[in-house]
Image: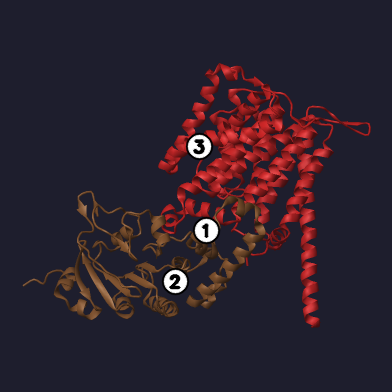
Chain colours: A red, B brown
Amino acid sequence: MRRVAATDRRARSVSASGLVAVVVGIAACGAWLWAFLATDRVWLVAALLVVAAIAFVLVPRVDAVGAYRDAFARHRRVAVALSALAVLGVGVALYDQPYPLLMLCTVLLFIVPCIGLTIQTGYAGIVNFAGAAFFGTGAYTAAVLASRHVPHLAGIVAGGVVAALVGSLLILPMLRTRGYYAALVTIAFGILFSTFLEVNNALGGPQGLKLPGIDLVGWKFNRDVAVGGERASFYVNYVVLSLALALAAFVFARRVERSWVGLAFDAVRLDETAAAAFGIDIARAKILAFTLGNFLCGIAGAVYSMMQGFIAPNNFTFGESLILVSIVILGGLGNPLGLVPAALVIVVVPQKLQFIQEYRFLLYGVLVILVVLFRPEGLLPRRAREYFAGTLR
Amino acid sequence: MTFGGLTALDALDLDVAGGEILGLIGPNGSGKTTFFNVLTGLYRPRAGRVEFAGRDITGLAAQKVFRAGIARTFQRSRLCLPLTVFDNLMIGNHVRLQRHLAFNVLRRGALRREFDANVEASRALVATFNRRLATRLFDAASALDMIDRRRVEICRALVSAPRLLLLDEPSAGMTHGETRELMDDLLQVRAARAELTIVIIEHEMNVIERMTERCVVLNYGEKIAEGPFHAVAADPRVQEAYFGQATA
C-alpha cells in the first residue's frame, strides 16, 4: 500500500518536473524570439542564430532530451497553449515597434500555408509547387469581395473556399499522375496563375489591387490600440488574428495526423498498391488532403493581403511557392512544429541581414541543399504517430 | 492475363472450398503471383471469371475485392516501415474504422474509445502469433527483424477478419528455423479460426507438405497438376516443370 503511494508520488513529481521543464523551455524560446525580432544589430542577430544552430546540433545528442521530449508529449495541450501565450507575449512586448510586429505576423501567416503543404506533401505525399498560387487565390478573392463591401470575415473564409475550389480543377490531372508528373502539373498551374494575373485587367493586371484593412464586426484592425495612455501599433491586431489562425491550423493538422485520416494519408504516401489492397480509397485521401491544404493556403492569403493593403501578381509567383516548399523541407517534412523555426529562418533572416536580401534565393537554395545532404529529415524530424498523449508506449 | 505478347496466366480452373488450406506451387514465372494480383483486383484479366462466395468479383477494384473479404500479403514486404506496428495493422483494419474527417478531428473522445478498443484487439491478435511482439506494438516496423515483419504483415491481412487469406511466399527471405516458427504461428491462428480459407504460394516444399491438404501446380500460366502434395510431387509433369526433361 505504502509502496503504491510512493510510486504515485514519484510519478506525480516526475510529471511536475516535466511541467516545469516545459514552462522553462517555452519561456526560453519566447525570450529568444523576442530578442530576435526586436533587434536590428547585425552582430546580435548573428549571435542569436549561432545559439539556435548550436541548440539544433547539440540537442539531439544529449541524453536528457529524451525525458524532456516525453515531458512535452505528456503535457502537449499545456505546451501548445503556453507556446501561443508566449508568442502573444512577444507581440505585446513589441507593442510599439511596427516593423518587428509585421515580421511576426508574416511568419505566422506563412506558417499557415506551410501547414497546408505539410498536409499535402508531408502526410499524403502530394507535392504542391503552387502554394503561392493558392495563397494568391485567397488574396485576390478577399480583394475582390472587399471592394464589393462583403463583410471581411466572409471574404476571408471565401478566400479559403475559392482556393480549394480552384484546386479542384487540378484534381483530375493530379489523380492521373504520380510523383514528378504530379509535381509538374502544379508547377504549370503556378506559372499559369501568375501569368493570368498579369494579363487580366479586371484584377488590376501587373499593377495589382489595393485592399482595406480588416474590419471584423466593428473591430478595425488598422487603428492603433490605445491602452491606458500607451499607444500600441495596429499590427498588434494582426498578431492576434494571425496567431489565432496559425494556432487553429496547427491544432487541426495535428488532429488530422493523429487520427485514422492521417493514417490513410500516410498509407497512400508510402505505398499506394498496399493501401489499395487494404481497401483504402486513394482518390478520396488525395482529394481530401489537397483540398484541406489549399483551403489553408487561401485563408492565410486573404488575411495576408489585407494586412499588406496591396497585392500584385509578383507576390504569388513560382518563386514564392518555392519559398513555401523550402520552409516545409527545412522544418522537417510532415512535422508542423518544424515550420516555426524554418519560417523564422526563411522569412526573417533576410530582413534582419539586409546585405543578404539580394541573394536570398541563393541562400534558400543552399539551405535546402544542406538540409537534404546533412539533415534530410529537417530541423525537427517527424516522430511516430502518438494518437493521444502517452499512448506511444 | 497477358503482358504485351506474354501470356502469364492462361488456363487455370481453380476451386477453393471454404475453410480449406490450398497450396499453389510452380516454378518461377509460372503465374502464381499474377493469379493473386488478378484475384485481388490489382490486374484486370482479359478473359475469365472470378467468383467469391457466390458473387462475381471479376475486374473489381482492389478496394472492393478487399471489402468482399479477401486479404493478402505480398511476396516482397510491403509494410510501411516508418510507421509503427500498430499503424500498419490499422491500415489493414482501415475499412472498419471511422473515416470521416469531422469525426476524426472533432470527436476525440469517441476516437479515443475506438483507438483503445483497436489497441486491445491488435495486441490480442499479435499475441496469438508471438507474445514478445505484442509488447512492441508501438515500435516502428523498421525496427523489427525479418520474421517479425512477416508476422506483422500476416496480422495486417488478418486483422479485418477476412474470409480468404492469400499468402504470397510467406517463407521468402527467412531461414528454415524461422519458417518453421512462422508456420507454427499460422497453424495456431488457424486453429482459432477454422472457417478461414487460406491459399499459400510457396517454393518451400516443407511448408506446402505441412500446411496444405491439397495443392495446385502451375507452369506457364496453366494448371498442370492438382492433388495432395505427395501425389503431385510424384507426377512426372511436375518433375519436368521443375527439373527439366530428362535427357534420354
Q: Which residue is mark 2?
A: B147
Q: Are marks 3 and 2 on the same chain?
A: no
Residue at image position (31%, 58%) is: B38
Position of residue B202 measured from the top left corner of the image (x, y, whole percent) = 31, 70
How far across and how far down the image is residue B71, in percent? 40, 64
Q: Amino acid at mark 2?
A: Ile
Q: CA distance from mark 1 to mark 2?
A: 17 Å
Asked whether, in this view, residue B163 is left or right of residue A133, the answer is left
In the image, is A359 to the left or to the right of A196? right
Left/right placement of residue B20 relative to residue B158 reads left
The chain carrying label 1 is: B
Identify the residue under disc 3: A168
Q: Residue at x 69, y 34 (%)?
A: A106
Residue A65 seen in render:
yes
Q: Is residue B68 above or below residue A125?
A: below
Residue at the outermost front position: B54
Cα distance in 3D space between marks 3 and 2: 44 Å
In the image shown, does A62 or B59 lie closer to the viewer? B59
The numbered mark at residue B82 is 1
